Image (spheres, rainbow, N blue to C red):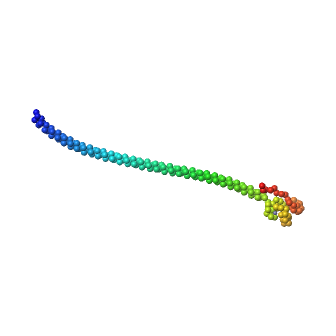
Amino acid sequence: MENGNNDSLQPKIEQIEQVTDQAIENLYVDDKMRRLIIDLQRHWLTDYHTAREKILEDLTRKLHEEFRQDQEKIRADLQVQFKQELDSTRAELEDKHAKILEAESAKLSEKHKRELSAARKKQWCFNCDNEAIYHCCWNTSYCSVECQQGHWQSHRKVCRRKKTGGGSSRDAQLPQQQFPSSTQ
Ligand SMILES: [Zn+2]
Ligand SMILES: [Zn+2]
């Protein structure tokens, strides 16, 4: 029984050894495969991470660029808006200024016109160019009796008052009507 057992054990051990070898071989192969798979996995993971990082980097860059462009657009818009406001403010001010100037100028021109018409209403002494207060006849006035009398010798030939009035030439030697004063 023991012998038989020994006899029958022998091939079994060999078998076991063979199997073990095979198993070791298998194990070795498995191990190689495992390492290969691990390497591959690691490689994929690395690839995955690299790709992921690249995508994230690209995305970050893209977002940053978009942000920068948005900022630029906002800045440009603000500048345009600011310029428009500035222009409209300037236009308003210029308009206001022009209106003030126009009013001022109208006032001045009105004043000038009044002064001019006041000056026109005034008459000047035919004899000495002072302001006249005595009127003789058309376009002929005097500042004083002296001027009227001094001028009479040359004026008597053309005096219209003599003709219209029909009076004697002596009348002209007297002071005539006094002008209503045009100066205030
Ligand atoms: Zn005079
Ligand atoms: Zn006269």
Residue 61, position as x, y percentages in the image: 42, 49
Q: Residue furthest top?
A: 1
Q: Is residue 34 left or right of residue 2?
A: right
Q: Where's the C terminus, which quadrant?
A: bottom right
Residue 161, position as x, y percentages in the image: 85, 60
Residue at image location 81% in from the left, 60% down from the top: 132
> Can I make out residue 12 in this image?
yes
Question: Total number of numbered labels?
Answer: 0
- Residue 98's image quarter? bottom right
- Residue 16's image quarter? top left
> Can I make out residue 139 in this image?
no
Q: Residue furthest front?
A: 2
Residue 147, position as x, y percentages in the image: 83, 63
Q: Where's the N terminus, which quadrant?
A: top left
Residue at image location 22% in from the left, 44% down from the top: 28
Q: Quadrant of ligand 1?
A: bottom right
Q: Is residue 42 above or below residue 131?
A: above
Residue 49, position as x, y percentages in the image: 35, 46
Residue at image location 82% in from the left, 59% down from the top: 133
